[in-house]
Image (tube, helix red, strand yellow):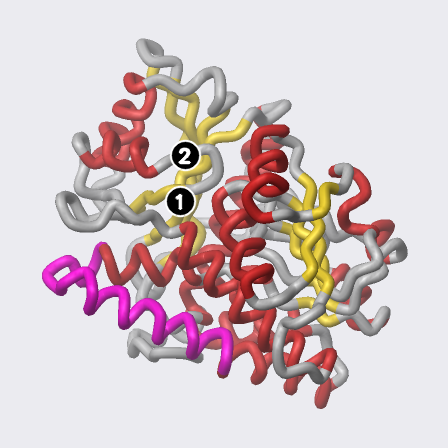
Amino acid sequence: MSVFNHPEFDNHEKLVFHHDKSSGLKMIVAIHNTNLGCALGGCRMWNYATEEEAVADVLRLSRGMTYKAAITGLNLGGGKSVIIGDPHKDKTPEMISAVGRFMNSLNGEYVTAEDVGMTGADIKLIARETKYVAGFMPGTDTEGPSPYTAYGVYRGIESAVRFKLGRQNMQGVRVGIQGVGKVGFDLAKLLIEAGAEVCAADIYTNNIERAEKELGVTVVEPDAILQQPVDIVAPCAMGAVISQKMISQLKASIVAGSANNQLAESKDGERLAAADILYVPDYVLNSGGLIKVYYQHFFANESFSEQKRKVVSHIDQMTQQTLPRIFTQAKELEQSTSSIADKLARERFMGNTMEQTDAV
């Protein structure tokens, strides 16, 4: 396997493979770009079919974190880590502790946080071994990034609905959510509370049963959720689900979800635009979690209430100012929203602009 010729390799600065024999940990860390600061990005545990699949995922995810940090105006680089294994079967306290010890060997080039397959308890265990972890404030804040990611996705959907559908509220708007784990569940709750009609699917039975019981979502089979006759499809699970084939089957006017790297390939952004479907760039829409852990980690001397105020304000600026700017530019220039977002992000991290802004 050649990394430098890998289709997902994008001038990444570092790719590190780590195996801890005693705990069984098999982990890969990718650092994409640190022009604006140290790399920060979550640690994901997933039952990858092959090591090649894990490498492709961590390369894509770390690149996305660079763009996400840049467009949100944070002085951070992009990085990500993945653990190969089933989080429901293979995870052990020994394995998670080994993650923390490995973080120390990177000397602060990369700071990790919670992601798919990991929990707040896992992050606390990692924090016993290293200071290079973000996502909670010991003794004060046990709240992880997921609620803030969901809040940002919800606020971004509001902006998309105003721009694309010309509607000022979510009453009666139909949304299909793919994946109702931590973020997807919170998003469904916010949407339903605002009057939206929500259908959902999840490959994990306990997730969808909880959403049906507690929220009253309409249950749809996982392989049919994206093709539902809804106003919005919200991919909130794994990436690369919006492909050329899938675009031809979409009945929605908007694609807006929390999953990273939703487009199977970059051209799919152009295909969505050609199909008159508004794509809300995922790394802009789901940036609430990163904003949360940034303030929590780098402003640890401030109170939880002050941090939360700043986080919510920053998310609101991203979703109510940056996203409409992207939508408008894309329409005026007859380009895809994904290409406009990429351009704005690249201008910042490639220009090595160190000044932090509230929103790009």
Q: Amino acid at mark 1?
A: Gly
Q: Nearer the viewer, residue 136 or 4?
A: 136
Q: Amino acid at mark 2?
A: Met
Residues packed near mark 1 inside 10 Å, few (<14), some (14 to 19) or many (20 plus): many
Mark 2 lies on residue: 118
Q: Is residue 109 visible?
A: no
Give, as a single range, the part of the protein colored magenta.
297-320
Residue drawn where x is 37% and y is 42% of the image: 114
Q: From the viewer's perspective, tell me whether residue 132 is left or right of residue 145.
A: left
Q: Tell me where residue 184 appears, x and y as whole percent.
A: 56, 49
Q: Tell me where residue 33 appears, x and y as whole percent.
A: 41, 56
Which quadrant would the N terminus be assigned to in this image? Answer: top right
Residue 124 in the image: above or below residue 176: above
Which disc is residue 222 wearing? none
Q: Are circles 2 and 1 on residues that touch, CB within 8 Å? A: yes
Which disc is residue 42 wearing? 1
Q: For the stretch drawn in magenta, what is the main secondary structure? A: helix
Which quadrant would the C terminus be assigned to in this image? Answer: bottom left
Sequence-wise, the earlier of marks 2 and 1 is 1
Q: Tell me where residue 251 appears, x and y as whole percent.
A: 85, 60
Residue 102 magenta: no
Residue drawn where x is 27% and y is 71% of the image: 309
Q: Residue furthest bottom?
A: 332
Q: From the viewer's perspective, tell me whether residue 175 is left or right of residue 41.
A: right
Quadrant for residue 224, please give it: top right
Residue 302 magenta: yes
Q: Is residue 331 visible?
A: yes
